[in-house]
Amino acid sequence: MKGRIIILVISLTLAGIAWVDIASKPKPLPFVVPKGWPKPQYDFSKNPLTDEGFELGRKLFYDEKLSKDSTISCASCHQQFGAFATYDHNLSHGYNNSLTTRNAPSLQNLAWQKAFMWDGGITHLDLQPLAPLTAPNEMGETIDRVIKKISRDTAYRRMFKAAFGNQPINTKLTMMALSQYMLLLVSSNSKYDQVMRGEASFNLPEKLGYEIFNQKCTGCHPPPFFTDFSYRNTGLRLDTTLNDSGRMKITRESKDSMAFKVPSLRNVALTFPYGHDGRFFSLYNVYDHYRSKMNVSKQTDSLLQKKLPISNYETGQLTAFLRTLTDSSFIKNPMFAPPGYDVTPDFMNLH
Amino acid sequence: MQKRVCKQWSQLFLVLILVMGLRQASAQTLQFVHAVGNAPLVLFDSVYYNRFGEPFVVNKFKYYISGIELTDDKQSTTSLSDKYFLINEEDSASKIITLPIKHNLRKISFLIGVDSARNVSGVQTGSLDPMNAMFWTWNSGYVFAKLEGQSEVSPAPQHSFSWHVGGFRQKENALRRITLELPPDGNLDTLRIKADLLQWFDALRPLKIAITPVCHQPGELATRLADNYARMFSVLQ
């Protein structure tokens, strides 16, 4: 009898240990590469995705406390319903009534990107959040204080432990968690994708627009990302209040003057205003630039030396096609919404 | 009786081995001593003059030391290739580096800065944690060395001068290797290396505060500053 009790106690203890062990192991989260897409650039082996890591990243992404005055989170400028760009803002609002000097790009398919920002100045996704966290016109905080705030918070301590075990909370793990959230922001289910998969079909204007797009635009905006991630000069005039020379700021080579990263056109209908400084308010302004307003110089991209003729008739068809790149399952995916919500509540969209 | 003696001897032997072992493991330390010419560096308070007669106060002085290589009198070399030290005038403990044993050192060589691999492989930890404010967040890369202060000749706001040197890409590589021969009797427990800030201004080419008070990116000014400060180290006897 006594022996049996002992055996029972031992087996219960063992089961308990096993349970705790299973419970404390983060659950792997698959990263699915859409059919026909290339291999991601991001090295997932150095930062394996897990449910717990993603959840932590999502909390960080929506946490205003990370900014100096606790008013601005990543999501203030990267709003889900705007495909993670700042909806209807040419420039975004940062700490203490400041403005960013560039238009916030959409955040999507980041796993395939080698370099970040309009000028490609940031060379690793894990490094990207350091820039907005510390920029005085974004979140205005020091990394040191960000890590201190997180380390003092019991909810964060619990979540770090669940995601990364007993490692001390530091910059690296915090950035890895943010990357886990951002890496899963994959948009691959627009009407265009469904047409390509044979699940839907284009109407006539969309089809005509697709053909025009293939002739005139895929030299720089090729599928599946609708960007080749290169830096190109599209004949934009320098805005003398911003004095932004683009890629040249990073390479310091005059050939890169006014060259900016070709933006993805996925979800483009939602990401207005357009251009690196948000100078184009609508798609029509963009077409007008390509067909007439461009300032062609030696540095202008070879594909645009003769500008891009686009007839009025074609603009409507191009727009019809570009609208097929809107992915409503992406902008409505509750997985990307703030922790505890299915969609971002209005009060979080004040900026 | 014989047995006891034997035991005592063996104990003594053990102790000896232990002591020798400890000696082997005993560390030599490297100490960085910061100076402006012949004067010791004191942050904020002291006014110094460079050789162009420009007066200046120093508020911050920090740099990375990495890739340390130690050569002993038998020409054998030990490298501490994966160790990165951030030497910071503000933090006296940071100015002392503990080395694995190398008595009879003949030569020491090290890099000022951080090799390109660590510049491009995501967020690093320890002394390389971007939290240490030695990282350019908008143009990924480490600041290898920082010298900041004030000078009435500076045209920059608040008469400040601020030299942040870095750059790991070709053509603008600011990484510099320094090699110092040690005196033959330099068998001390602490090897003291002097870093003379005055060299930043003119060791190879003149760089005046009045003309270039700010360097906040890789490029020509940064590599010139690196060429100058690469000559700031000497062994203190």
Image: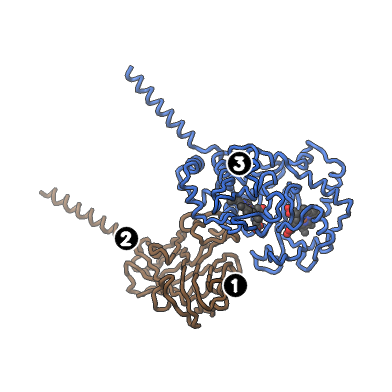
For label 1, the residue is: B220
Q: Residue at x 75, y 49 (%)?
A: A268
Q: Mark 1 Cα within 10 Å, few/some/many (few <14, many 20+)?
A: some
User: What count of labels does the image hold?
Assistant: 3
Chain letter of the residue carrying label 3: A
Name the residue rendered at 86%, 58% in the picture: A309
Subunit bearing disc 2: B
Front one among A239 and A295: A239
A121 or B102, nearer to the observer = A121
In the displayed structure, does residue A107 sit left or right of residue B85?
right
Does the rendering let one see residue A78?
yes
Q: Position of residue A36 (x, y in %)?
A: 72, 43
Q: Colour of chain B?
A: brown
Where residue A105 sits in the image (x, y, percent)? 68, 52
What number is the disc on residue A338?
Answer: 3
Q: Identify the residue at the far top of this view.
A: A1
- Chain letter matching colour blue: A
Q: Quadrant of residue A323?
A: top right
- Tell me if label 3 and label 1 are in contact, CB under 8 Å: no
**Of callouts 2 and 1, the N-terminal one:** 2
| Type of amino acid under label 1 | Glu
Q: Is residue A212 above or below residue A243?
A: above
Residue A228 makes an appearance in the image: no
Q: Are marks 3 and 2 in contact (CB under 8 Å)?
A: no
Q: State the image quarter where residue B109 is shown.
A: bottom left
Looking at the image, is mark 2 or mark 1 nearer the viewer? Answer: 1
Amino acid type, label 3 = Pro
Q: CA distance from mark 3 to mark 2?
A: 55 Å
Q: Which residue is mark 2?
A: B26
Task: State the quadrant of the N terminus of chain A.
Answer: top left
